[in-house]
Image: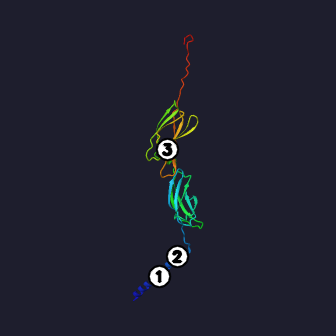
Amino acid sequence: MYMKNMNKLIILVVSLLVILLIGISCNDMNDIQAEFAERDEIVYLGKVDSLTMLPGFGRAKIIWYINSDPKIEQTVIYWNMRNDSIVRNVVPSPTSDLQKDSIIIENLDESAVMFEFRNINSKGQSSLYTSITVTSWGTDFASNLLGRKLISKEFDYDLSQYKLTLSPAAVGDSVAYSQIAYTDMNGEKRTIKVERKTNELELDNFSDGSEFQFRNVFFLPKGMDTVYSSYQAHNAPKAIFENGKKLALKGNLTSRY
């Protein structure tokens, strides 16, 4: 009889504890629900979509689309850890569900930079961020591309002419043309554009020992700009004329010579 009463007492205590814990949990859940119910509903604007980019020489072009959300007033473009930004005003199109926009970012270093986009309005509403990594080209990039090279140089002293031979242009090398720059014997600066089909040329009125510079100019199919490699300097040989030495010899005054 005693054991039965003890079992009933234990069951009663356990039941009371379970009911107490359930009550506490319900109160906590109600508090959480009340806290979120008091908050204003977060409204997100339509985000920037379908980001693409075209690399350029020291710059890049970014293209994007936004939907026809009439609440969107501006698009903010961030880079450099969001320390730099550009703001674009948005005028919703009444005739299209998607609206295209683009921008060219100038003065970029030769590197890859991440840009982040977010739509905002004057009510403090905003969209989620959208990002894209943008590449900017420079002379280091161009110098590593497959380009034409000077394969022979012959200087004609009599004609003051430098005869040059370039390697033939290769299929798929992206070379638009090559450039040679020099200053002639009259002090006039000349820049010669060497087309892809030209393999031999002469630099006229070229002084011995003078310098000319050579570089390739590229246009890549997926870019927006021509890309210039660094100039490489080349010198013509210098003609050296050495005079004979004056000799002082003692002679016989009575001699015929």
Tell me the element at label 1.
Answer: helix
Asked whether 213 or 257 is in front, the reply is: 213
- Judged from this view, the residue extending furthest toward the bottom is 1
Question: Residue 19: which numbered mark, if any?
Answer: 1
Give the labeled residue for mark 3: 177
The answer to whether residue 180 is above or below residue 114 is: above
Asked whether 119 or 175 is in front, the reply is: 175
> Quick one: label 3 or label 2, which is nearer the N terminus?
2
Give the labeled residue for mark 2: 33
Tell me the element at label 2.
Answer: helix
Residue at the image position 57 percent from the left and 39 percent from the top: 189
Asked whether 58 or 70 is in front, the reply is: 70
Would you say residue 144 is visible in this rendering? no
**Circle 2: residue type:** Gln
> Quick one: label 2 or label 1, which is nearer the N terminus?
1
**Circle 1: residue type:** Ile
**Classed neighbour count for the residue bearing mark 3: other residues with Cα under 10 Å, few (<14), some (14–19), many (≥20):** some
- Judged from this view, the residue extending furthest toward the right is 122
The answer to whether residue 207 is above or below residue 102 is: above
Measure the C-alpha gap from mark 1 to mark 3: 86 Å
The answer to whether residue 196 is above or below residue 88 is: above
The answer to whether residue 140 is above or below residue 91 is: above
* Coordinates of residue 116 in the picture (x, y in percent): 53, 60
**Classed neighbour count for the residue bearing mark 2: other residues with Cα under 10 Å, few (<14), some (14–19), many (≥20):** few
* Coordinates of residue 4 in the picture (x, y in percent): 40, 87
- Judged from this view, the residue extending furthest toward the front is 95
Tell me the element at label 3.
Answer: strand
Mark 1 in CB contact with mark 3 (< 8 angstroms): no
Measure the C-alpha gap from mark 3 to mark 2: 70 Å
